[in-house]
């Protein structure tokens, strides 16, 4: 299994049972980022906003993936969706591992949602705030979930991301066992327990 981050909330997950892209962003929708050409078996968009729902940006492979996908309904804000609408968490089960992408989650999960999420091996969580949960809530949620590996996303970095969202350091400073990787790729089998901050390779100035 291999996870590749393309900045913002976009990831390519490649497994022995198929591949999937989470939340591809449209051209010009995220400052400093440009999505390269990606081919995958499946595209999963947490909601329809341009910076998460650009399914046309992914070339279909024509293959049918063999993994299981579970959906958990939630909201893009902490007011029941009245500000920004709904959001869908996706959990992929492949190679005996569970990978959860929280999309643009805007609130702390309730007991029912936490039970549905369970304890994934790999948790992809927004941390930048403003449009999503911020560093404090993200840290609280990450600790409650207890995934073996947590990867932050949807934050402002050097040369990329929205000015109104926070940097990853705000989240990392609230967590233990934080590792800053020098690559945008991750192999769960070779990644130690804790938080892994991937390097964004697609920034264009």
Image (spheres, helix red, strand yellow):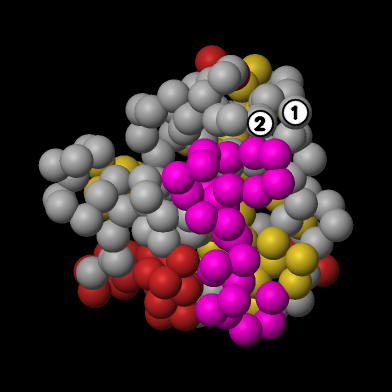
Q: Which mark is residue 205?
A: 1
Q: Residue at x 75, y 34 (%)?
A: 202
Q: Residue at x 51, y 55 (%)?
A: 166
| Residue 126 % position (x, y) | 48, 55
| Residue 28 % position (x, y) | 57, 19
Q: Residue at x 52, y 24 (%)?
A: 29
2 and 1 marks in contact (CB < 8 Å): yes
Residue toward you, 97 or 90: 90
Q: Secondary structure at mark 1?
A: loop
Q: Secondary structure at mark 2?
A: loop
In this view of the protein, can residue 59 be seen by the observer? yes
| Residue 142 % position (x, y) | 47, 73
Q: Which mark is residue 4?
A: none
Q: Is residue 111 left or right of residue 177?
A: left
Q: Is residue 84 above or below residue 151?
A: above
Q: Which residue is mark 2?
A: 32
């Amino acid at each position: 299994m291999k996870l590749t981050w393309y900045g913002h909330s976009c990831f390519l997950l490649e497994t022995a049972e198929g591949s999937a892209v989470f939340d591809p962003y449209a051209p010009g929708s995220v400052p400093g980022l440009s999505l390269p050409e990606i081919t995958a078996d499946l595209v999963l968009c947490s909601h329809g906003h341009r910076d998460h729902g650009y399914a046309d940006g992914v070339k279909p492979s024509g293959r049918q993936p063999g993994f299981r996908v579970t959906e958990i309904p939630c909201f893009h804000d902490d007011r029941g969706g009245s500000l920004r609408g709904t959001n869908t968490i996706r959990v992929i089960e492949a190679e005996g591992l569970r990978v959860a992408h929280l999309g643009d989650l805007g609130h702390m999960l309730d007991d029912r949602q936490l039970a549905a999420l369970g304890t994934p091996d790999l948790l992809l969580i927004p941390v930048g705030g403003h449009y999503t949960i911020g560093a404090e809530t993200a840290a609280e949620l990450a600790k409650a979930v207890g995934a073996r590996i947590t990867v932050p996303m949807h934050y402002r970095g050097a040369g990329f991301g929205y000015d109104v969202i926070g940097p990853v350091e705000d989240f990392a400073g609230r967590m233990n066992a934080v590792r800053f990787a020098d690559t945008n790729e991750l192999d769960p089998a070779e990644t130690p327990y804790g938080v892994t901050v991937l390097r964004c390779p697609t920034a264009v100035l």
